[in-house]
Image: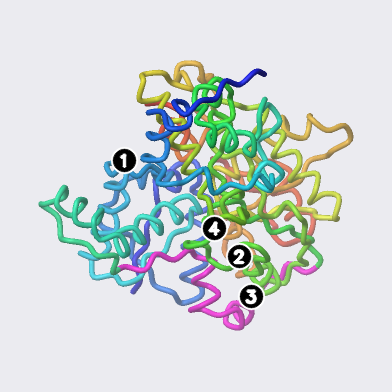
Amino acid sequence: MTLSVSSRTVRGPLIRKVREISGQDPNLCFQCGLCAGSCPMTTEMEIFTRRVMHLLQLGLVDEVMSQRMATLCASCHTCQVRCPRGIDIPRVVEALRLLTLRAGENFLAPESVERDRLREMPQVAMVAGLRKLTG
Amino acid sequence: MIGYYPGCTLKTKARNLEDSALASLAALGVEVEELPRWNCCGAVFSLADDDLIHHVAPVRDLIRAKDAGHSTLVTLCSMCYNTLARANRLMRDDEEKRATLNLFMEEETDYFGEVEVVHLLDYLDSVVGWEAVRAAVTTPLGGLRVAPYYGCTLLRPGEVAIEPPVSPVLFSRFLEAIGAEVVSFPEATSCCGSYQILANEATALEACATIIEGATARGAEALALSCPLCEYNLGRRQGDAVARRSGLGRLPTFYFTQLLAVALGQPPDVLGLDRNEASSSALLRERGFVTEAPAPA
């Protein structure tokens, strides 16, 4: 992947928005990778959390949002508990999710969930899933 | 008397969690009162600095607890615990957001985080005490090898963890008190995939397979849980999860409160074992911990 970085990307409006929504500073990350090594949801991820943090340091929010990392996060907070730099990574991921959801694009089409599944699924799954993955 | 917040799922899909817990608390002499009015807590805590509206639901529940005169609010569902405890902390510690939320809910009592939100496992440890639990046990689960599965929301984030999240012991103490044999396994605090079962099923089931495999490899005969979403992913969807690993068999799952009720000699109708997978109730019958077949749903 070729990355194009300039002072415009590093201080662009999207990364400012991510910082504002999350209240977190991705620049604190020193790329140890403990977050990626701890993540239980990597089965289908193209890029892992460590790389997400690096791309955010470069201001490349669009690059991150073109990957599925944020949509696969289960908000388990394992990365947050283990981050030696004290970054609340789930808040960063929530900000990334919200940039997409607030633009009117959903990660989950409620009608795509099978009827039989809906019948057996606990309410807490549906409420949590729809809260996190739809706008 | 302490306040009790059930949450949506416990009134329907997870009645076996509520019924077994309430019967057990009564047997232990703990009086609880369900909040006279409550709403869904929202299941997940909003992590965005500019999104206060999603805190309104849990805060409203906390206000109801305060208005009912409760200083302690007990929860059973791990996700409700997490959401309510974090909202409570926000109202206690963040002056600016507290002021905005109180202003938004003008018609309600102002709230400052006065109520303490407690999960039942923590309550058993800190108030009832394991000695009292042990003394009340009539059917110790001797020889039953149970792996305690914490999942995420009892332990993370750290500020609402029921105990330090790195090496938790409360669940093991609980299982010891009811006479079961504790099977420790490294995936006890791993995530089951949570709500991703809706959108990214394969990833969630893979996470579940890893958990079941870890517990099975260490000799567990059953998993003990406290979250209805974990129970769905690891219990009801277990067939799909174990199918991802060759040679991996079924592992019975129980809410910890069901095991407690069995140990306290509670009748089969409060156990709600018919809502568990068939292998779960079969295991308890086979060991003679329960004698009757589960009542039909």
Residue B140 is a magenta residue: yes
**Which residue is under mark 3?**
B137
**Which residue is under mark 2?**
B260
Q: Residue drawn 36% across and 40% down?
A: A20
Residue type indicated by callout 1 = Asp
Q: What range of the chain is rendered magenta?
A: B115-142
User: Which one is in front, B149 or A2?
Assistant: A2
Quarter of the figure with the N terminus of chain B: bottom left
Q: Residue drawn 30% across and 64% down?
A: B92
Instruction: Using the image, name the chain to which the residue with label 3 belongs.
Output: B
Question: For the residues carrying marks 4 and 3, which lies nearer the camera in this image?
Answer: 4
Q: Measure the C-alpha gap from mark 1 to mark 2.
A: 39 Å
Question: For the residues carrying marks 1 and 3, which lies nearer the camera in this image?
Answer: 1
**Which residue is under mark 4?**
B154
Residue B9 vs A100, above or below: the answer is below
Instruction: Using the image, name the chain to which the residue with label 2 belongs.
Output: B
Q: Place residue B64 in its image quadrant.
A: bottom left
Judged from the image, the secondary structure of the residue bearing numbered disc 3 is loop
**Which residue is under mark 1?**
B51
First reached walking from the N terminus: tag 1 or tag 3 = 1
Question: For the residues carrying marks 1 and 2, which lies nearer the camera in this image?
Answer: 1
Q: Are marks 1 and 2 on the same chain?
A: yes
User: Which one is in front, A128 or B260?
Assistant: A128
Q: Are marks 1 and 4 on the same chain?
A: yes
Residues under numbered marks 2 and 3 in contact, where contact means CB atoms less than 8 Å apart: no
* Position of residue B134 in the picture relative to residue B57 (left or right): right
Q: Are marks 4 and 3 on the same chain?
A: yes
First reached walking from the N terminus: tag 4 or tag 2 = 4
Quarter of the figure with the C terminus of chain B: top right
Residue type indicated by callout 2 = Leu
Q: Measure the C-alpha gap from mark 4 to mark 3.
A: 25 Å
